[in-house]
């Protein structure tokens, strides 16, 4: 089994009120990622994702270039990826 990678993200642009978190949850779950996402008071969506390097790479691409149908992504910022020995989360969730 490939190692587990953890990476934090924050997405800027029109990402609130456009079902961005719902679509992020759906995409992350389809990829088999674990973690969470939430709206911030600054108008961004941030979160943490854990999974294989390939899963993380695909999700980074989705967060930067796809998003929800009505979103407009200006940029996505990612923390340095770090290896973790085990998952911290049982699934991917949306925090309110």
Image: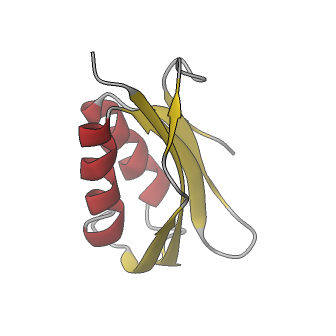
Q: Is 69 located above or below residue 80 in the figure?
A: below
Give the residue at the far right of this rendering. Answer: 41
Q: Position of residue 45 (x, y in %)?
A: 57, 63
Q: Residue at x 33, y 63 (%)?
A: 67
Q: Position of residue 94 (x, y in %)?
A: 57, 40
Q: Quadrant of the C terminus?
A: top right
Q: Residue at x 44, y 59 (%)?
A: 20
Total residue callouts:
0
Q: Residue at x 36, y 39 (%)?
A: 28
Q: Is 21 located above or below residue 74 in the figure?
A: above
Q: Is 79 located above or below residue 6 in the figure?
A: below
Structure colour scheme: secondary structure
Q: Nearer the viewer, residue 38 or 90?
A: 90
Q: Nearer the viewer, residue 30 or 7?
A: 7
Q: Position of residue 84 (x, y in %)?
A: 54, 28
Name which quarter of the figure residue 5 lies in: top left
Q: Quadrant of the N terminus?
A: top left
Q: Position of residue 7 (x, y in %)?
A: 51, 47
């Amino acid at each position: 089994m490939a190692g587990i990678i953890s990476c934090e993200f924050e997405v800027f642009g029109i990402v609130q009120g456009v079902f961005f978190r719902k679509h992020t949850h759906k995409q992350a779950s389809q990829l088999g990622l674990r973690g969470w996402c939430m709206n911030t008071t600054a108008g961004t969506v941030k979160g943490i994702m854990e999974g294989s390097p390939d899963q993380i790479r695909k999700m980074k691409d989705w967060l930067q270039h796809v998003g929800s149908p009505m979103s407009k992504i200006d940029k996505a910022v990612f923390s340095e990826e770090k290896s973790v020995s085990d998952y911290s989360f049982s699934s991917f969730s949306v925090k309110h």
